Amino acid sequence: MHDDLARSLGRLSQLALDFARLDEETPVRPILDPDGGAERLALALPEQGLDIDTVLDKLAQLLHATPSTSGRRFFNQLFAGRDPAATVADMLASLANNSMYTYKVAGPMVLVENLLVKEMGALAGFDDPEGVFTPGGSLSNLAALLCARNGAVPMARETGVDGRPLRVYSSAEAHYSIRKGLGMLGMGRDNLVSIACDTEGQMSPTALDAAIAADKAAGLTPVMINATAGTTVQGAFDPIDAIADVAEKHGVWLHVDGAFGGTLLLSERQRPKLAGLSRADSFTWDAHKMMGVPLICSVILVRQRGLLTRLLNESASYLFQGDTDLHNPGTRSLQCGRRNDVLKLWAAWQYHGRAGYAARVEHQLALANALADRVEAADDFTLTRRPASLNVCFVLNDKPADIICTQLNERGLAMVGHGTVDGQMIIRAAVVNPNLEEADLDELLRSIREVGDTL
Ligand SMILES: Cc1ncc(COP(=O)(O)O)c(C=O)c1O
């Protein structure tokens, strides 16, 4: 083995331990001023290479200045925490450095991916699913849109879209990747029809039905309905079964974006929130959100085996040399070279088990509800509505949510984001880290009050 490789691997565990400890001790790091930050951290690229210890020291310095997403004060995003098995598996995936396009190069890692696709597809209720891991929920949604578009305009892949307006329906609360996808696929972002939500932030099937009927009457082509299982701000679940009735009635592709809420499938108690999912044509599920697997780990699943391969395969004799399409996942991927994102999920699943994951989800939901209870019981806070999943949306009465969130970060108290619900700016605390304790929730509210008192 090369001496420097042995040296860097030898130092790895200490570097990683130091970093994990820092997250315990300083869960919110001082904000690095981007002006001058590159100089402070000596980021400039050298003309001559440095010795390996200097490079490792620089890496440690950079990491220590980077915001923590696994500490006890991080409520800012739909991912958080650090999984022991998945973290190490992800590091090992880099060490193995396989590319997930062929069995020849990735070997049993392909079997791992196929296993996870089968298992996750079965949880979605798909009898014979096909799927592939992608670089994130946005790209999983893009793959679904591509399938739906090519279903509606079969020649689009060969000759391009033919100019007819191809309409996509999604709730006003849906993630922006759907609109972005329309732009990327040449379908026109203006062809996204925003469907109203009810008071719980769920897409209205009645409004959806009316919008599709109106488009059909006007000669437009409905292509896809996007239902969300776990919306980005409120964590709400669209009523998939009723939406599937509308999709069936009009013969429109139904995609379910479960990037966030798909994980509830792991709990039998929570699974009814996604009732009707087995009727969907495609499904996005991000394991890097609620399942706690390091970024990135997302899968696009389709109900009908063979569809992704039909739409995404290219002949490349320099790459696909033997083995079946099933064992050459590159034939159904948006990508050529592809990182092994599935190993960490497999490791986490080995570690928790399905039952352990179910308990973990229940615990996350209990924490979110505990925060909501505290907010609801306090006179100076107002809860926007009871959490549908892990997002707790609320205000500190008469205080601006955006300024509170900025100051929490600047003062090193917490990282929390803000959003808009029913036209009101709210604090959105995503309670995703299962290692939080109720004392952390109290501390969050105490910090918000501390900031609020100064405004
Ligand atoms: C509902 C939903 N869909 C899709 C995405 C995009 O996922 P990613 O960040 O993995 O691209 C998000 C991100 O938060 C989301 O909340």
Image (tube, rainbow, N blue to C red):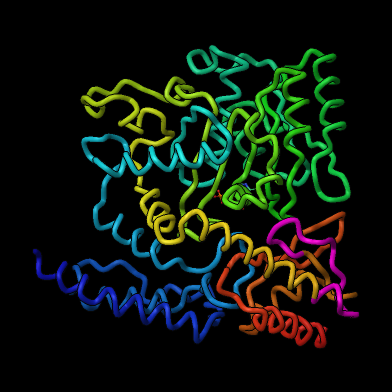
**Would residue 383 be counted in the magenta stretch?**
yes
Residue at x 84% of width, y 75% of height: 396
Position above or below: 136 against 44 = above
Left or right, 109 with respect to 438, comes to left
Residue 426 place in picture, x, y as percent: 80, 65
Residue at x 46% of width, y 60% of height: 352
Kindly indicate the quadrant of the structure image that contains residue 332.
top left
Residue at x 19% of width, y 68% of height: 49
Residue 390 place in picture, x, y as percent: 68, 61
Residue nearest the observer in this picture, 426 or 30:
426
**Which residues are drawn in magenta?**
374-392
Residue at x 27% of width, y 34% of height: 102
Kindly indicate the quadrant of the structure image that contains residue 172.
top right
Residue nearest the observer in this picture, 137 or 31:
137
Position above or below: 8 against 272 = below
Residue 327 place in picture, x, y as percent: 31, 31
Left or right, 137 with respect to 376, comes to left
User: Which quadrant would the C terminus be assigned to in this image?
Assistant: bottom right
**Would residue 454 be counted in the magenta stretch?**
no
Number of marks present in the image shown: 0
Residue 56 place in picture, x, y as percent: 27, 75
Residue nearest the observer in this picture, 350 or 79:
350
User: Which quadrant would the N terminus be assigned to in this image?
Assistant: bottom left
